[in-house]
Image: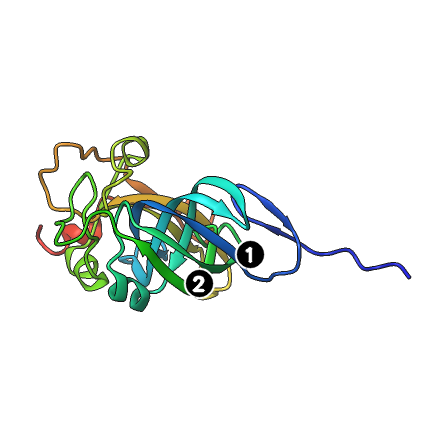
Amino acid sequence: MTLPLLPRYYTKTAVFERPMDKILFTGRIISVKARIRLIRSFDEIPTHQYQGYTLILDGAVDGVPRSRFKVAIGPKAYEQHQFRIGDAIRGHAIPVPDAETEWAEFYKVSGLQLIERRHPGDWPPGPDGGIAPLLEQYRAQGHFRLKRETCETECGQCPFGLTMPTQIILDHWNPSIVKWRVETHCYGPRGCPRYKSGPAYRVPGRSPGMVYVDDDVEREARGE
């Protein structure tokens, strides 16, 4: 009897020749980021989905050593454990089926355990780490666009420098027509010495040549 071929499930860094079942991950946290999705529709102020947090780890996936892999967790799990850099954790998760819609590689975590905490006590958030705020604070502060190279090289440990999957609704009369990209933004306070603004984001419309330029309209609208 010929067995059917198993489907292929892609992440940004690996291909899984297996059914969409859970993997076992273990590792030490090297960064904690809020997991926020941005939704754009031409010249409207962008909206957001505050989904939880993304843990960046060095460790292993199903026993295979991996560096800098990303696991998405929900807000309740984060509030329970207050994860921070240096924590050793383990759990089960599912590979993300569509890498365009998620920055993380794994999600739908279960059996999450905190094994060791290297930095107990209070640790205010800042450029070198700290305890990431609750999502309500991110929502209240809003964001500025952040230069992508700065986000990658200077903001790797900062909980305020985020890489955000961005859904662009090309025609608000037909919201099923969308495209995806990633944007980098800073949710931190003004005055960070590492901050560098990136170019304004250009948002296409439904017709050729229609482009709206978002010059931090969301946060400027608050008078900040």
Q: Secondary structure at mark 1?
A: loop
Q: Is residue 61 left or right of residue 131?
A: right
Q: Residue furthest front?
A: 116
Rendered image: mark on residue 179:
none
The answer to whether the residue labelled 1 contacts the one labelled 2, judged by CB atoms less than 8 Å apart, is no
Residue 141, position as x, y percentages in the image:
15, 55
Q: Residue furthest right?
A: 1
> Splitting the image into 4 quarters, where does residue 83 fall?
bottom left
Q: Is residue 210 left or right of residue 99?
A: left
Q: Secondary structure at mark 2?
A: strand
Q: Quadrant of the N terminus?
A: bottom right
Residue 41, position as x, y percentages in the image:
37, 57
Task: Please identify, in this view, whether the residue under mark 1 or under mark 2 is nearer the observer.
Answer: 2
Is residue 94 at least partly visible in the picture? yes
- The residue lying at 30 percent from left, 65 percent from top is 75
Q: Vertically, is 143 above or below 152? A: below
Residue 65, position as x, y percentages in the image:
50, 40
The 10 Å Cα crowd at callout 2, few under 14, some 14 to 19, many 20 or more, is many
Q: Vertically, is 115 above or below 85? A: below
- The residue lying at 48 percent from left, 40 percent from top is 66
Is residue 36 at least partly visible in the picture? no
Q: Is residue 156 left or right of residue 7?
A: left
- The residue lying at 32 percent from left, 31 percent from top is 149
User: Does label 1 or label 2 sit earlier along the sequence?
Assistant: 1
Q: Which residue is mark 2?
A: 109
Rendered image: mark on residue 97:
1
Residue type, mark 2 in image = Val
Residue type, mark 1 in image = Pro
Determine the CA span between mark 1 and mark 2. 14 Å
The 10 Å Cα crowd at callout 1, few under 14, some 14 to 19, many 20 or more, is some
Residue 17, position as x, y percentages in the image:
67, 50
